[in-house]
Image: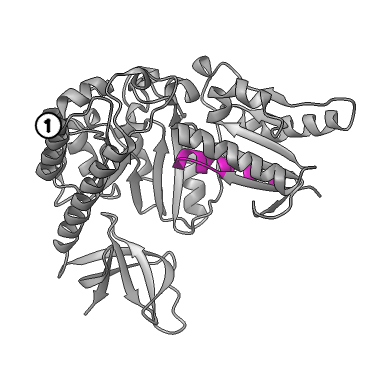
């Protein structure tokens, strides 16, 4: 029995696909071992969203070969699509499998292993024309998480933001068949999962390749799946939050009032340079619609600081807009120059020192706004889906999340197992900066 070690780099979509590859390998009799152990085969599901991600992908591949020089080292995914020439020159990688070939990984691997026993030497690359690829169907029966199941509903992106390489690595929008999504949701419910998270590269475009947006209709049908009690959405574009969409999903009680609306900048001039397809006024309208139909929804976002040409005035505009919206959480990223994108060739590239200063200023603001949002729930009773036990200050607690993705903890009773259980509790104080305590 050959041993296989898998390592995932990148987003939740990559994590979903890594789980699927592991599931296929186990079904074929391979033994899965930790990546830091000796293995016959090492598989790295690569990421290429930034130059740093490329470097990390190469580092993990080299680390695998160093751990066992006789092992077969396999690069899979996005970096294979964008860095194919470099990988073919890299003697570390034996087999490179591109996007939309992951479901065929076992067959490709076994064909390589068979040929390796003969006269073949050198690396082998297996990719397809990602631009015209169909949706690559994968169905998971379980995930590494115990209470929350991620379900991939689409792949690819048509946006071509000036800083982003993903359309070249993932191809154009391809939506998963509704029947396959529902089948997987039913399977996850049967396995005991009570919460699902819809993920993809650009889930707001679900169904666009078939002539129109179908996300609202999919949410309605998923809401009918018995056993699934919460539906959480991955990152959305503000443009999808029309009056009709907000009214529609707010009538579905299983849809969590937690929305991650991608922003990237609070300056309209920067948004135009980024080729984002909205302005701050349109973004604010989307947030206001959500707050019209939901009571105090959790609104989170991503922000890029130090985009090429970003002036102090534009950065100040972003700061002011973030305060105006009042986010629950923000993920702050320093702009990373990505070769192959239009932004990489733009004038006015900021220094790392300048980006670091601006990043710290926004992270400070994020901490302030996040604390303020959590404070609005003190004294209120919220439903919590408990996930795992943790130790804090010598005491044991069960920790989980509310529908708005607030982390909450309840002091454990000896012998009590609350994993995957839902219960209502009153939030009384802060146990930690990001953790609210349930009490009497």
Q: Is residue 20 magenta?
A: yes
Give residue 42's position: percent from left, percent from top.
69, 43
Say if residue 401 shows up in the picture. yes
Q: Hey, which quadrant is residue 324 in on the image?
A: top left
In-image side of 225 versus 367 (left or right)? right
> Which residue does the image show at 66% across and 29% down from the upper left?
96
Q: Secondary structure at mark 1?
A: helix
Q: Which residue is mark 1?
A: 313
Give the quadrant of the C terminus. Answer: bottom left
In-image side of 424 versus 62 (left or right)? left
Q: Hey, which quadrant is residue 339 in on the image?
A: top left
Residue lying farthest bottom?
A: 414
> Which residue does the image show at 75% across and 47% down from the upper left?
68
Q: Is residue 354 magenta?
A: no
Q: How is the image coloured?
A: one colour
Q: Hey, which quadrant is residue 357 in on the image?
A: top left
In-image side of 299 versus 56 (left or right)? left
Give residue 172's position: percent from left, percent from top.
44, 20
Q: Looking at the image, which is closer to me, 254 or 208? A: 208
In-image side of 224 versus 15 (left or right)? left
The prevailing secondary structure element of the residues shown in magenta is: helix
Dot 1 alpha-carbon crowd within 10 angstroms: few under 14, some 14 to 19, many 20 or more: few
Q: Which residues are magenta?
A: 8-25
Q: Looking at the image, which is closer to me, 347 or 175? A: 347
Say if residue 303 shows up in the picture. no
Give residue 2's position: percent from left, percent from top.
79, 47
């Amino acid at each position: 029995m050959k041993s296989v070690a898998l390592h995932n780099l990148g987003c939740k979509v990559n994590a979903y696909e890594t789980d699927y590859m592991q599931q296929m390998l186990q079904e074929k009799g391979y033994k899965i071992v930790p990546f830091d152990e000796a293995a016959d085969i090492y598989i790295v599901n690569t990421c290429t969203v930034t130059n740093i991600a490329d470097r990390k992908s190469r580092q993990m591949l080299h680390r695998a070969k160093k751990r066992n020089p006789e092992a077969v080292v396999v690069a899979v995914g996005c970096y294979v699509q964008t860095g194919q020439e470099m990988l073919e020159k890299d003697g570390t990688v034996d087999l490179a499998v591109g996007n939309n070939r992951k479901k065929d990984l076992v067959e490709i691997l076994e064909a390589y292993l068979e040929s390796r026993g003969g006269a073949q030497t050198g690396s082998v690359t297996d990719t397809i024309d990602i631009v015209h690829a169909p949706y690559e169907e994968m169905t998971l029966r379980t995930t590494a998480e115990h209470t929350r199941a991620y379900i991939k509903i689409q792949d690819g992106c048509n946006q071509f933001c000036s800083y982003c390489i993903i359309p070249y690595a993932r191809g154009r929008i391809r939506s998963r068949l509704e029947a396959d999504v529902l089948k997987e949701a039913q399977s996850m419910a049967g396995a005991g999962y009570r919460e699902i998270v819809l993920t993809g590269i650009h889930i707001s475009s679900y169904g666009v390749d078939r002539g129109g947006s179908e996300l609202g209709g999919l949410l309605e049908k998923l809401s009918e799946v018995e056993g699934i009690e919460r539906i959480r959405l991955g990152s959305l574009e503000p443009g999808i939050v029309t009056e009709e969409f907000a009214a529609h999903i707010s009538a579905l009680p299983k849809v969590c009032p937690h929305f991650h609306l991608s922003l990237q900048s609070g300056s309209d001039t920067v948004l135009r340079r980024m080729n984002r397809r909205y302005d701050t006024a349109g973004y604010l309208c989307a947030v206001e619609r959500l707050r019209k139909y939901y009571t105090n929804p959790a609104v989170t976002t991503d922000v890029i600081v130090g985009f090429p040409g970003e002036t102090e005035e534009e950065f100040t505009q972003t700061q002011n807009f973030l305060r105006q919206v009042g986010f629950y959480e923000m993920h702050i990223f320093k702009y990373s120059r990505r070769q192959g994108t239009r932004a990489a060739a733009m004038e006015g590239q900021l220094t790392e020192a300048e980006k670091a200063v601006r990043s710290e200023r926004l992270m400070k603001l994020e901490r302030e706004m996040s604390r303020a949002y959590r404070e609005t729930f003190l004294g209120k009773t919220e439903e919590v889906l408990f996930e795992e036990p943790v130790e804090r200050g010598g005491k044991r607690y069960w920790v989980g999340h509310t529908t708005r993705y607030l982390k909450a903890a309840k002091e454990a009773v000896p012998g009590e197992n609350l994993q995957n259980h839902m219960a209502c509790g009153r939030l009384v104080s802060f146990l930690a900066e990001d953790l609210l305590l349930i009490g009497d």
